[in-house]
Image: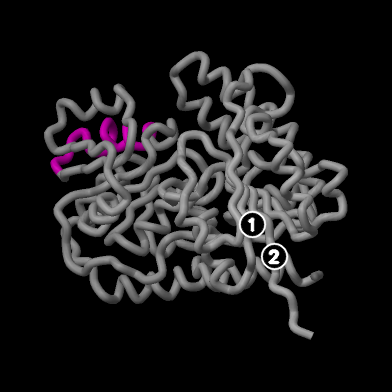
Amino acid sequence: MQKLPDRLHIVSFDNPFPPNYGGVIDVFYKLKALHDIGVKITLHAFEYGRTPSRELNQFCDKVFYYQRRTFVNPFVGSVPYIVATRKDDELLKNLLADNAPILFEGLHTCFFLDHPELKERFKIVRMHNIEHDYYLKLEEVESNFFKKYFFSKESARLKTYQSVLHHANLILAISKNDETYLRSHFKHVELVWAFHSNENITSIEGKGDFALYHGKLSVGENDDAARFLVNHVFNDIDIPLFIAGNKPSSELRRAAEDKPHVKIFDHLSTEQITELIQKAHVNVLPTFQATGIKLKMINVLYQGRFVIANKTMVCNTGLEDLCLIADDANGFKTLLHATMQKDFAETDMVKRKEILNKNFNNHQNAMLLKQFIFKNF
């Protein structure tokens, strides 16, 4: 008898196309890799600003879209806002159309995880962050009073709400640090590293003449990191710094105004950012947020030349040997001066290929995920 194809529901917190920011990058390239190894996917995506995407139809058997309920009062109720705004009875109805396993992308999508009608289903949750830690860090770097209060309240609600994960048959961590935390609180935790857009090393040998920081600057964590570079690293050195990312804060723009060697690029396409990553001599990646894994670090290691990061960015990622690590602003300055004198060589790329293929091969990780989910079916 011919075996029926493996089928899987994926519930995404956002439309994963285009895959141009952290979480949706993991979602999009995961569903693409699963499709490539024969998994039949029914995708459920919440919308809030992105239009339905025909591109998803080539990787999914079915795609359902749901409007996110952003009219919900963010300061009221015990259910986290990011979860309450993704409650849709039509989603539950569509999940009940068959008995396929369900992969919930992020705590955001877990409103129905403990629903009685899904009790007998095999349910997986992909954790992109330890969400309450993530929101606590957002609160720490936020200056707007109302946003600061929201992040604090949301962090407290998320810490309580995460107990819903006891209803999952499998929890997928995205980093070693997250795996350690999740294993200390829940059973059935496995590590599956982030999925991403890269198949080959596309770094260019030789030298560039500027350093680059890129990220979604509307996220406080990224804007904070960019301001750290402008105010404390590139404040008194003449190495050019390019900053690429949408919606830089007024504080960041003001910090860069009197520094002619610092340039901010807003509203660049993914292709334009990739070009900057490849042309830069050094990609500088500080972060003050230790949860999850930063997909931009994976991208710059596949696409760029030298990478200087702090310990918070690289600790327990398995990528420590591919980065130059600075502890503080002076450490960044010292490494920048030394690295700008070096050529990026073929031997650097060989080392990258060996290490990146070990943990960050999309096909290999899709096969691992398929084994975890379908070994009992």
| Label 1: how many Cα within 10 Å (few below 14, some 14–19, many 20+) | many
Q: Can residue 155 be seen in this view?
A: no
Mark 2 and mark 1 lie on one chain; the one further toward the N terminus is 2
Could you tell me residue 262's position as x and y percent?
A: 18, 37
Q: Give amino acid for label 2.
A: Arg
Image quarter of the N terminus: bottom right
Residue bearing mark 1: 42
Q: Which of 147 and 309 is in front in this view?
A: 147
Q: Nearer the viewer, residue 345 or 191?
A: 191
Residue bearing mark 2: 7
Place residue 266 in its image quadrant.
top left
214 w.r.t. 73: above or below: below
Image quarter of the C terminus: bottom right
Mark 2 touching mark 1, by CB under 8 A?
A: yes
Could you tell me residue 152's position as x and y percent?
A: 60, 23
Please identify the residue farthest to the top as the structure is shown.
Answer: 145
Q: Which of 374 and 208 is in front in this view?
A: 374
Q: Describe residue 250's horizontal placement relative to residue 157 as left or right.
A: left
- Magenta region, residue range: 223-238
345 w.r.t. 163: above or below: below
Q: Give amino acid for label 1.
A: Thr
Could you tell me residue 136's position as x and y percent?
A: 57, 30
Q: Can residue 135 be seen in this view?
A: yes
Name the residue rendered at 30%, 37% in the picture.
229
* Residue 353 among those drawn in magenta: no
Q: How many marks?
A: 2
Place residue 205 in its image quadrant.
bottom left
